[in-house]
Amino acid sequence: MLQLKSINLKKEKMTTLIVPVCKDKDIHDNSDVSKLVTSAKKVKEFKGRANQELIFYNPPGVKVKKVVFLGIGKLKEIDPETLRSISGKAVKKCIKWKLSDVLFAVPAAQKVKLKMTDVLGAMMEGAFLANYIFDRYKKEKKDKKLTRLKFLVKPDTAKKQRRLPARIRKICSGTLMAREWVSTPSNDKRPGQFARSISAAAKKAKLKVSVITESQMKKKKMGSLLSVSAGSTSSARMMILEHNPRGAKKTIVLAGKGVTFDSGGINLKPGSGLDTMKMDMGGAASVAAALITAANLKLKTKIIGILPLVENMPSGSATRPGDIVKSLSGKTIEIGNTDAEGRLILIDAITYALKQYKPDTIIDMATLTGACVVALGEKIAGVFSSDDKLAKSIVESGEKTHERCWHMPLPDDYKPLLKSDLADINNVSSARWGGAITAALFLKEFTEDTQWAHIDIAGPAYTKKAEDYCPPGGTGFGVRLLCDWLEKQ
Ligand code: BES
Ligand code: ZN
Ligand code: ZN
């Protein structure tokens, strides 16, 4: 639970106080905290450099049992992300120390040259996101989450920012929800199970939920989507989540790739790293969580979430390379590679959304290509759009939430690489290079004239290594970004 506190450290007892310390400036405006920082800096080895740590037990003048000073580096290095990281690191330490409760000394906004909402918001985000443990599959639950995350601020700040804790909790709970879905193993999130889990969470947030079953998809002729699930013993689903506030002017569609396991199909992937392909539904997880969060935040825009959920498996009934399938749009597709399945499910979802909702804008989020990870690494997503303004607004939201995106090119003259001699289009490029771009160009062919952007999150949706405010597993990348973007509409 996030709480703002304006307490007197001289009088009120506290177990643990976390104090971020800047190397070249006192960034606090609470005189008790500033005094503590001055005495900490008298300790020779402690300079306030990034990653330095110093602990005082029962220091004189305040009633705090343990004061933890965490170096944050030079003033010019302080931005919302360093604040998220520092509070995230602090929470991780407190969990290890088996604490239940912690108080953060919040730097003064004007001293770090930021807005108070940004300073406090970032500290709360880092703390809330780090206070998360995925131990559902452990018999022995070693660590426990903290029950209270408190932030020390002046009384007028507490008053002005009184709505911020609930807002940060709603947004970050969305991220945690997406993490939980992504980290869940594929044997517990086959399309039907995953759909039920999303449905339960969405209904709680009062979203309208509908589910298209595989037999309904056959009637509607979603041949492209169905070709991906043909090899699996689990049947596919397409979920639609609707946030429909009264008086909304615009309609936004968010589509998310939901491949609950991507074996590659008949073009079976090599063994190494195959286990991480449980994360191939990261786009669907982030879109579902963003819709739930949008509903909780009572956003004013009409938002439709479209989630094609399938499992991509090889078997006697699986689609073969060379097969030709007919998409919902009527266009035929030659399957050059059964491992390029994400685009096949997304285009039927996009066509359905265009027909059904005539949206102003459509954004899809997908763990679409390994090529995007080659291009941008594991922390940065690729944004593809023929609308530069739309791409820019997405990149800006990502800067704000530190879910970084890079605007990638979408050149028309790469389109012939998707030519098929026998069908209208091939699902893979005839060239070896530029796979993230040709995947995006494939999607573009099905967006008609609607304003559209595609976010390839193959890199950042999952992490094998623990980060400052994210344990190994699903990262929930994109939820906070989408919420920020939706709020701007
Ligand atoms: N799910 C993968 C993309 C992926 C790769 C996600 C690494 C996360 C980490 C996607 O379905 C895929 O297999 N893409 C192929 C496309 C190729 C066959 C044209 C790829 O990127 O190799
Ligand atoms: Zn694949
Ligand atoms: Zn995939």
Image (spheres, rainbow, N blue to C red):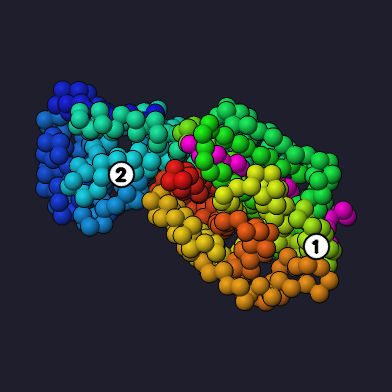
The kind of residue tagged 2 is Asp
Q: Which mark is residue 128?
A: none
User: Residue at 25% across / 28% down in the picture?
Assistant: 159
The residue that mark 2 highlights is 118
Above or below 119: residue 423? below
Q: Is residue 433 above or below residue 137?
A: below
Whole-angstrom CA distance, mark 2 to mark 1, is: 49 Å
Residue 469 occupies quadrant: top left
User: Does residue 319 show up magenta in the picture?
Assistant: yes
Helix or strand or loop: what does disc 2 sit on? helix
Above or below: residue 458 compared with residue 174: below
Q: Magenta span covers which residues?
A: 300-321
Towards the viewer: 3 or 406 = 406
Mark 1 or mark 2, which is nearer the start of the sequence?
A: 2
Q: Which residue is mark 1?
A: 332
Q: What's under tag 1, amino acid-wise? A: Thr
Q: Percent position (x, y) of residue 146?
A: 40, 31
Asked whether, in this view, residue 190 is left or right of residue 204, the answer is: right
Label 2, ligand 1: CB separation under 8 Å: no
